[in-house]
Structure formats: C-alpha cells, structure tokens
Image (spheres, rainbow, N blue to C red):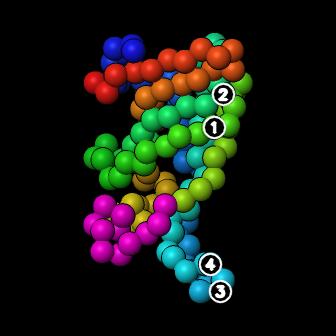
Amino acid sequence: MDTFPREKRKELIKAKCLKKTHHEPSFQGTDVKHRIDFKFRFANSYKKDIRAFAGNLLVKDLFDELVFTISMKVQDPIRANGTYNWEGGIEYNYFIQDQVKLNNLPLKDMKVEFVTKSVIFTDGTKQDYENS
C-alpha cells in the first residue's frame, strides 16, 4: 500500500465530464427511475497500460465546493497516456439534497477530480493507495 498524498492521487488518472443530462423515465418496460446520466473521459497519466481502476470521482462547483462523490470501479483498459470514455449514471431522488445540487449544477460550472484508490495494470501488477 502506497502513502501517496491524496492531492497527488488526483493527477494519476484525470477525469473530465463531457456530458451531464437528467433522464426522465418513460415508464415503458424497465425505464421507471429518474437518473442523472454522465459521459466522463478518463486520462491515464501512468507510463503503463491500465486494465482496471477504482476510486472516487469528486464533483465540485465553481468555488471548489464538493457537491457530490461518485465511487467508481472501471474494468476497461486505458493505454499509457491514453484516454477512455465512460458512460453511465446514478439514480436520482428529488428528496436527497446532494443529488438535487448535482442535478441543478450546469456542466459549464462543474469541476471533476478522480482520487485513485487502486489500479491494476495489464502486466498484472497492482497499485493500492491509502485513504489519506
């Protein structure tokens, strides 16, 4: 386990939000829940290819105030110094204040940072980081 400082772990895998939309359910089939859908681009700053990674995606406003945290595990490869686009979403509940703030935050005012917890490289090695 590495004691890499939290601020430095934000530089290992960089994140950018390309798209954020609110999904209204159609109530057809299994489409019965409200969601906030995202498209994120992750950039690998390591000199090795990544097989999978885990960490927390921090969503902040223009003033760097934390709005929401998304815990993520991504099991898709990213080449060294390459990028990967991830698409997905979270269920949206009108009664959870943090989710309301996230939903109302315009994309142009949204900042994201990825704090790496663990990385598995394509060569089989693994790097874990403490929660400091």
Amino acid carrying mark 4 in the image: Thr
* Lower position in the chain sequence, tag 1 or tag 3: 3
Amino acid carrying mark 1 in the image: Gln
Residue shown at the point (58%, 46%) measured from the top left: 40
Label 1 close to label 2 by CB (< 8 Å): yes
Label 4 close to label 3 by CB (< 8 Å): no
Distance from Cα at disc 1 to Cα at disc 2: 7 Å
* Lower position in the chain sequence, tag 1 or tag 4: 4
Judged from the image, the secondary structure of the residue bearing numbered disc 2 is strand
Amino acid carrying mark 2 in the image: Arg
Q: Does the magenta stretch include residue 97?
A: yes
Q: Residue 132 vs residue 128: left or right?
A: left
Judged from the image, the secondary structure of the residue bearing numbered disc 4 is loop
Judged from the image, the secondary structure of the residue bearing numbered disc 3 is loop
Quadrant where the C terminus sits is top left
Distance from Cα at disc 1 to Cα at disc 3: 30 Å
Q: Does the magenta stretch include residue 54?
A: no
* Lower position in the chain sequence, tag 2 or tag 3: 3
Q: Residue 75 carries which label?
A: 1
Q: Could you say where residue 118 lies in the image, as x and y percent from the top left? A: 48, 26
* Lower position in the chain sequence, tag 2 or tag 4: 4
Q: Mark 4 packing: few (<14 Cα in 10 Å), some, or many (20+)?
A: few
Residue pointed to by mark 2? 51
Indicate whether 113 appears above or below 25.
above
